Image (cartoon, coloured by chain):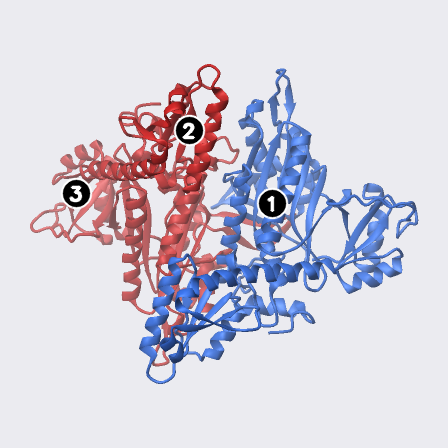
Chain colours: A blue, B red
Amino acid sequence: MKAKKSNFSEWYTEITKEAELCDLRYNVKGFVVFRPWSVQSMKKMYDIYESELEAHGHQPAWFPALIPESNFLKEGEHVKGFVPEVFWVERAGSDALEEKLAMRPTSETAMYQMYSLWIQGASDLPLKIYQSCQVWRCETKATRPFIRSREFYWIEAHDCFATKEGAMAQVHEDMGMAETVIHMQFGVPFIFFRRPQWDKFPGADDTYAADCLMPDGKVLQLPSTHMLGQNFAKVFDVKYLDGTGTSQYVWQTCYGPAISRIYAAIISQHGDDKGLIMPFALAPTQVVIVPIVKGGNEKEIEQKCNELKKTLSNSGLRIHCDFTPNTPGFKFNQWEMKGVPVRIEIGARELESSEYVVARRGAKEKSKVKEKDLANAIAKMAGELQSDIISIADKWFSGMTHSASTLSDLEKKIKEGGFVRVPFCSTEMDGEKCAEAIKEKMSGNVRGTRFDKHEKPKDEKCVVCGQKAEEFVYVARQY
Amino acid sequence: MKAKKSNFSEWYTEITKEAELCDLRYNVKGFVVFRPWSVQSMKKMYDIYESELEAHGHQPAWFPALIPESNFLKEGEHVKGFVPEVFWVERAGSDALEEKLAMRPTSETAMYQMYSLWIQGASDLPLKIYQSCQVWRCETKATRPFIRSREFYWIEAHDCFATKEGAMAQVHEDMGMAETVIHMQFGVPFIFFRRPQWDKFPGADDTYAADCLMPDGKVLQLPSTHMLGQNFAKVFDVKYLDGTGTSQYVWQTCYGPAISRIYAAIISQHGDDKGLIMPFALAPTQVVIVPIVKGGNEKEIEQKCNELKKTLSNSGLRIHCDFTPNTPGFKFNQWEMKGVPVRIEIGARELESSEYVVARRGAKEKSKVKEKDLANAIAKMAGELQSDIISIADKWFSGMTHSASTLSDLEKKIKEGGFVRVPFCSTEMDGEKCAEAIKEKMSGNVRGTRFDKHEKPKDEKCVVCGQKAEEFVYVARQY
């Protein structure tokens, strides 16, 4: 493996290939084949995120993948944002279709026409529905597996409320779910920013997006939650009768965790120079058992491996015995590279003593564990692994925010990677030209203002135009 | 609700609407919105089927939804079978694509080019991969929700083997999984037929398909498993080096359980004149708690409902308390219609005695259960419900096969519904004209020969042409 710190880009390319996470040789540009080792983890990520959404009152639905062009054309900003990237279906068999159909790049315009039929009174609210699906966008930016491709796997939650306050509470809930799932369970820290007005979701009043950092210090955007206000409600006629019998437009939010992209953040955050390090809950194989065969005891050892596999599987663990003809050393490297959290070695000595050598991915030392204590020892290692990866990630992430007060200082620090906090004139539309200047001069991207704390400049001046700074914004290079 | 037996078609239409299973008002012809009540069950069906596939050595992958036209054109029969139904993408944004892309109607031509890259030696076999996804086919037949739509939800498993025997063993395994999942867990009986040569999967050597019966006696095809032979292997160059260093084509099978269609079979098989009856494991809500409030004890009863919900949820049950302002009688009907397996009623008397009225869907009598025994009683009811629905379905299904030896007898019995067993000249291509005669004259469809038993005519003559009968085939009207 390449060194991750000094050469992240090559490390990433290599690990996606060596660990058989995906295959880029599929013959449609920008489309990737996701192989079993990544899909098994991403399926578990889906389960965890869906459970969290359901625990917060969401229900699953499946909406069509194709959306009529006329639906799209209804919301002006939305059209401008997405139409240039849409894959269009214009023909079925040899017949031209009456109306062009868009392969969904996102589902607002598919779902809200149905919401308009489903919502009548206040008792139908809140309506909270999600779907897990693929979306398609013909990206013009360079694609990278899991990070950005023309087909990706996400969850989209679309919620309706009677009041603006209800919708805003949902924005907070969405952020909380990201914290519970992505930070606490997947071990990836991030900051939620309120995006500048020129960089919000097309059709939204406001966008709040979680930015994590890749090891090279560049930002990767994770879930965003959008306050849609009543923009789509007015266009799709989503109304309810309030207590006084008056028809009111609903307030809406939408929320989009991209599972394949979060997977990119997980493997990049936790991996090391040996390969992947996977959170225990997401590892396709949690424990690998490696037989160490020397002269003649092959059958007994194999039997013992299978016996342990059976016992441990009963405690709900995902176990694999590696009986391939490779050397133990090769196997150790292979499974470490694939990020299997725990390895048990079984040789002649272990067979005799019923005490096994157990190694935990990411830990420096191996330990010896008696057979009867194995399940407990593995559970303990799972906990240690989880707290290790989170504390390593948090420590690193907290050191990745810097401040600058001049343009040249900003330029220097942006190059070093991470977020750079600067005083800034305004994230309303007025400030766009200052953001563009930063982008042109130093490829820095204004991510917005922190949502979790109120940071108000006193006498600072905008780092670009020198006008009075109304806000502190965070700047970073981005994926 | 309409009476199911006498008017199945209207019953079906009504239940899909009343139970909020789907919405047909989406504005693309043949595309359906699947609503939470059905999606929650179908997600559980996916979990169960995927676990079964994984227990039999399959691994999940995700292949692109778009397939280049040139991939499609490689296998002649496959092209003829699918191209007339393909939705084509020819444009992204405002740019014409270099090559037309098919929205996958099935994934052989997406997957096997990758298999050709992944398989090198005998140690790479068997390769057993599945994906859970949607497929799109612009059906010309009339669409019906869950039964046939232009977008449907399925699992497709695509397996490669070193030998023909290995592939044939997979065909048997596929049938076994259908028995375990669809019959034993979902309660839907079926017969596997070897389809006539003129009715097999385009590109396969042989197709084996499970036919169940809808309440009106018409056949609905459930999963089929296909012996692909080496047809696709030759076209996509899927080869391995055998023990002697010789390059050999693999033998392939594919298997396609359509989850949305199996759902149609489940609700149709088990439902009654009150509405849905769902297998316990698939019910979105397994137990509904209905408060019976009379004068002033509202708060205490609500508290008790929530308390029971919490306790029972801890035993892994999915519980809902219905606190809407509707009458108890309305609620009873509503939740029976939605197929919730168990109902607990809590009124003043129950609050005092800690003994609750418990009703099981499909059972004639209610019972009284002490609070401490509730979890056990519900588990017992779940078992009774499961054995009930299976035995009712099996009994009905076993009475739905008849025999005929003349064309007029066949015509009469086909009209009555179910399978009619007749002596038949041949299910090789020679017999196609006799099958067509049956179809034209009486809308009967030759489903093929039974796979589970060898039935060889002695001196019988083909019911159509009067030539020596080589086989017994089963004829039925179909969806």
On-image quarter of the C terminus of chain A: bottom right
Depth order, front residue of A259/B321: B321
Three-letter code for the amino acid on which mark 2 is drawn = Ile
What x and y, as percent, mark residue B471? 16, 51
Q: Where does the image place residue A2, in percent across and percent down from the top left?
A: 63, 74
SS under mark 1: helix
Q: CA distance from mark 2 to mark 1?
A: 29 Å
Q: Earlier in the sequence, mark 2 or mark 3?
A: 2
Q: Name, please, the residue furthest toward the front.
A: B352
From the viewer's side, name the closer residue of B118 and A324.
A324
Q: Which mark is residue B289?
A: 2
Say which element carries label 2. Answer: strand
- Is A198 situated left or right of B415 in this image? right
**What secondary structure is marked by label 3?**
strand
Q: Position of residue A89 (x, y in %)?
A: 55, 45
Is B131 left or right of A227, judged from the image as shown?
A: left
CA separation in Å, label 3 and label 1: 58 Å
Q: Which of the labelled discs sits on residue A177, or is there none?
A: 1
Residue A350, labelled with which disc? none
Q: Quadrant of the N terminus of chain A?
A: bottom right
Residue holding disc 3? B421
Q: Are marks 2 and 3 on the same chain?
A: yes
The chain that hosts pointer 2 is B
Q: Amino acid at mark 3?
A: Arg
Instruction: Identify the subunit bearing mark 1.
Output: A
The quarter holding residue B377 reads top left
Subunit ID for the residue under disc 3: B
Position of residue B309 measured from the top left corner of the image (x, y, whole percent): 45, 34
Disc 2 residue crowd, few under 14, some 14–19, many 20+, Cα 10 Å: many
Rendered image quadrant of residue A232: top right
Marks 2 and 3, how far apart at CA: 48 Å
As drawn, which residue projects farthest toward the left?
B459
